[in-house]
Image: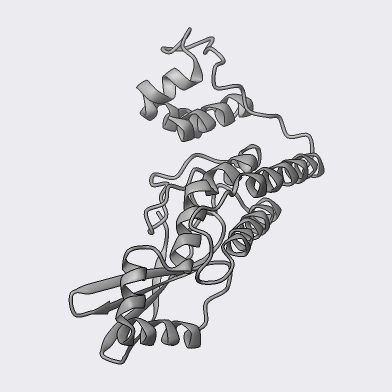
Amino acid sequence: MAIQDRVDTFEIEGVSVTVRLDAGAPTGAHTQAEVSGEGWTVSRTWRFGSYSRAHCRNFARKLATDAAYRRRCLDREATWARVEDIYRRHREDVLAVFEPLASGPPAAEEEETDGAPGRLGGRAKLEGRASGLANRFCQEFYEGIEGLLGPADGPEDVNVGPLKEDICRRAAAETKALEKALGDRPGPLPVDRKMTFGEHEGKTLMQIAEEDPGYVEWALEELEGRPRLRRGLARALRRA
């Protein structure tokens, strides 16, 4: 589960603002602000270190004093909201590139607190150089979306396909290079590989993860002498 800490609260122009730091997102910490007035609440996420208190205060003030802008934010039509929504719809395709670098059992909860699913879960899954690599490409993707949208009155329909394809292609190349640099770690067994022993003999790792996740959790703790099997089961459980 993502870890949230309240870092700031204030009032401005008659609205209240609560700011939290989310330290458990798949690509590092981000900052969330909840601005509430009479009968309405707008939540905004600042990613990749872009948050500042001055910016947040200006945002809250505009929400409080500009009804038309507030309605655009509530309807997810403001540029910042469109960037965030597009990013969240496509982020998993970028994160999937880094799955070969993930290690350890999946977290019990694999969601960011803003409701977007996190395939890789929290930092325990993607650490060190791998986490930095994922963060860099996700930030590049996010900023690329901002560039496509441009000014506040940018195009209604934005094709992020070419941008995402380029990001994923370059990220895959660097992921492969990082895997090699980290050493010849044995890769996970394919999720369609069949179990050759035990109570689930004859079933694929994917079937086991779907039918008996408790067994997978046990195996991840106990089968220390079978690293490829453990990593294959962990991958299957993430996909189940």
Q: Residue at x 80, y 42 (%)?
A: 177
Name the spot of residue 121 as percent of width and height, x first: 48, 48
Count the labels in the image: 0
Q: Position of residue 235 (x, y in %)?
A: 53, 32
Identify which residue, 148 or 184, lies in the foreground. 148
Q: Is residue 222 visible?
A: no
Q: Is residue 52 above or below residue 231?
A: below
Position of the N terminus by quadrant: bottom left
Residue 193 location, x and y as percent?
A: 57, 15
Q: Quadrant of residue 7?
A: bottom left
Q: Is residue 55 left or right of residue 225?
A: left
Indicate the colouring scheme. Answer: one colour
**Side of 87 relative to 128 (left or right):** left
The residue at 54%/22% (across/down) is 191
Give the position of the C terminus as an image quadrant: top left
Instruction: Identify which residue, 66 or 93, lies in the foreground.
Output: 66
Query: Which quadrant of the structure image shows residue 78?
Result: bottom left
Q: Is residue 70 above or below residue 196?
A: below
- Asked if one can make out residue 234 in the rendered structure from this viewpoint, the answer is yes
Task: Spot the residue most to the bottom.
Answer: 13
The image quadrant that residue 49 belongs to is bottom right
